[in-house]
Image (cartoon, grey):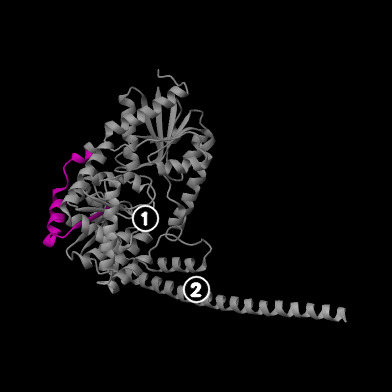
Amino acid sequence: MEGAQRQALIEQVGVAARERAALASSYLARVRAATARLEATSRSSSDISDALLAVGDHANLDVDPPTASRWKAFTLVKLVVKRLTRWYFVYVGQQITSLGYAVIRFGTATVERAERLEEATQALQERVDALEARVEQLHHDVDDV
Amino acid sequence: MRIDQFLPTFVPDDAIANHVLCSRDTFRQEGYESKIWADEILAPLHNQARQYLEYSGGADVVMYHASTHSPMVDFLRARPEPLVIYYHNITPARFFTRWEPLAADSMEAARVELRQLVPITRLAMAPSRYSETELIELGYPRTTVSPLLVNFDEYEKRASRKLLARLRGNGVGNGARWLFVGRVAPNKCQHDVIGAFAAYRHIFDPNARLQLVGGVTSDLYYRSLRRLVAELGLEDSVELLGSIPFEQLLAVYHSSDVFVCLSEHEGFCVPILESMHFGIPIIAYGAAAVPETVGDAGLVLGDKDPLTVACAVDRILSDQSLRAELVRAGRLRAHDFALPNTSRALLKTLSCFLAKHQVKRG
């Protein structure tokens, strides 16, 4: 396929997508939101919201481990172990997941409080700067007199 | 004349391990001696390689396959033999920071090691221009592109009949069968494939099915994929098959209608070539080395919005002449990468290197 043909095809696909967009807009919005939550990249290793997101990811414990193996015997062993221990891991897993969510709530509350304090500090700093400028101006005025 | 190859992990049915084995056979057929040395050697490859710490020297050229962090790098830096590296690419750490922080650190360490090898490396090879560019940016003075060796004869083996029957039987009402093969890792973006598949199923084909094949690199990402599948109500149509035996992989290829790759980082992507070999049309997102590997034998998209990908798949599967053209182009492209062609290219590169450095064949 020639480059121009391929480009035309990609454009046709784009047109088709735009035409279909309205047909399933609410479902597509749901799909986009769900996949966006799994975006691979983080903004920065020190970003507090990303760190909280990571806690959220890790808080969801999966007590249903994969049992596939390259060797059939191992698959069988894994299945047997999984069935025998499932009750135990579900019991423990639920508690750890709850703990995870409690940590997220605590973290979210802490982040929000820190952000409010940051805003308040910023506003106070601006008032102090304005007052300092005013005092300096008054000093100049006194000197001039 | 002896060319020894070193790699951190030697794992069966792995693209790097297969390349190393094919390279060794190519060297031997050409009259060179050649052995494989690795840090971790998994069954059934124990008799194909030896632990690298037992290495006592004797090679005229040492070839290191760089892809991950390894203590082997310090070992090689202290060796006197001329060093050639083959850079399979290292996934940028940013893809793993959120999911597997330890793996992210390991990838950072691997990049540091790659930089440390610059002063002692005589020749740096890569399977794609994309990876070669990284080598040039790191300061490697002599670089070249040398294709990955893939032995397509292996793909003529018999596929698992049981799985083939199951997969073909699953196509209730002849729904389209989507496929992606690659390790379950955040840079491979299986979540985008699932999203696009959900859109396709909702709009075009409620009987469509998706098979995701590949071992798990990130457990957390894998679990998130499973939750995504459940959230979108796709439990009955999406299969996360994990790492499967080769005969089952063949069955999956034989039963698929379209290969959808929405990876954001690939150093080459062998499954694209495999799909071409099996006559499966390719739809891919144009990131990293993917456009290079696909060439003109697939549809490379500039964005991977679920609806765009779904419409692209629908177009390819509903337009028979377009599909036939892509399949034909794919088979030609796969032929370019046939072992006789790629091994010849590898030997040519190495012969030029040996001649330049006056390493004479004995």
* Residue that numbered label 1 is attached to: B185
Q: Residues within 10 Å of mark 2 (few under 14, many from 20)?
A: some
Q: Secondary structure at mark 2?
A: helix
- Looking at the picture, do discs 2 and 1 lie on one chain? no
Q: Is residue B59 visible?
A: no
User: Going 23% across and 51% down the picture, which residue do you hit?
Assistant: A73
In this rendering, the answer to whether B231 lies above or below A9 is below
In this rendering, the answer to whether B181 lies above or below A137 is above
Residue B237 rendering spot, x and y as whole percentages: 21, 63
Residue B219 rendering spot, x and y as whole percentages: 36, 59
Q: Residues within 10 Å of mark 1 (few under 14, many from 20)?
A: many
Q: Is residue B179 visible?
A: yes
Closest to the observer: B212 or A43? A43
Marked residue chain, label 1? B
User: Going 34% across and 48% down the picture, which residue do you hit?
Assistant: B290
> Which mark is in front, 2 or 1?
1
The magenta region covers B154-180
Residue B238 rendering spot, x and y as whole percentages: 24, 61
* Residue that numbered label 2 is attached to: A107
Marked residue chain, label 2? A
Q: Is residue A75 left or right of residue B53?
A: left
